[in-house]
Amino acid sequence: MAMDTVTSRRQFLKLTGIGTAGIAAAELGGLGFDLAFAGQRAARRKLEGTKQTASICPYCAVGCGTLINAKTENGRTTIVNIEGNPDSPISTGSLCPKGAATFQLAVNPLRKDKILHRKAGATDWDTEPMTRDQAMTRITQLYADSRDATFVEKDANGKLINQSTGIFALGGATNDNEENYLIAKVNRMMGVVRIENQARI
């Protein structure tokens, strides 16, 4: 078959590029489509019937402003959207990646809402979830046992130090300021000196 009657690979790629550019032009308004307007309408429809509340991001100490939209249906209130507050003098509507993902933390279908327990040496979780009281009692007992077993009252020179050397406190990535503050205060009160709270500044 003659080469001039067959579309070469190079010609095919050129044609594909032209087609892609045409589609992009149409999407950007080249054929009369106003995507910005469509996006604004979709956003407004999403927030229709919601109550907007000004708040602050719960992470770190910067205090960026947020706007929380919530909708109440059948007596149940659910968060619909969380975004930066443009009226905030601190952040003027900007949020860091952590703050921008606050909605995903608050409304997450994968988030566990039951306390699971796996016994020492077991390969599977217990079939029955623990109650909050059971979990707090167990944590308190293990914490007290570790402190009693590793507490050091005085150093080698006889200086009073009162340290719990067998406990390391690590604040989780989703802890807010108040939780980190309480973690630090409680652990210092118990003599823990190895404390990390994952500050985001």
Image (cartoon, helix red, strand yellow):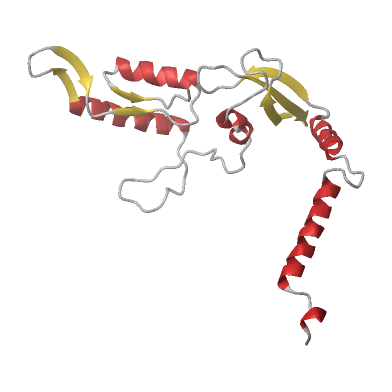
Instruction: In the displayed orientation, state which residue is furthest to the bottom.
Output: 1
The furthest residue to the left: 157
Asked if residue 99 lies left or right of residue 170, the reply is: right
Locate residue 165, reporting x and y percent.
22, 26
**Residue 30, position in %: x, y?**
88, 45
- Identify which residue is drawn at 30% across, 29% down: 168
Task: Give the quarter of the image for residue 181.
Answer: top left
Q: Is residue 83 left or right of residue 148?
A: right
Q: Residue at x 19, y 27 (%)?
A: 150
Instruction: Tell whether 197 sits left or right of 120.
Output: right
Q: Is residue 75 visible?
A: no
Above or below: residue 8 compared with residue 114: below
Q: Quadrant of the N terminus?
A: bottom right
Q: Return the residue nearer the eye: 28 or 129.
A: 28
The residue lying toward the viewer, choosing from 32 and 80, is: 32
Judge whether 110 appears above or below 16 on screen.
above
Q: Which residue is at 84% across, 34% downward?
A: 45
Residue 165 located left or right of residue 156: right
Occupied quadrant, residue 83: top right
**Residue 130 x, y percent position in the rendering:** 45, 38
Count the marks: how many?
0
Coordinates of residue 149 in the picture (x, y in percent) = 19, 28
Q: Give the quarter of the image for residue 111.
A: top right
Report if residue 122 is visible in the image. Answer: yes
Question: Which residue occupies the extreme right position in the image?
Answer: 32
Q: Is residue 196 depicted above or below 162 in this figure?
A: below
Of 42 and 144, nearer the camera is 42
Q: Residue at x 80, y 79 (%)?
A: 4
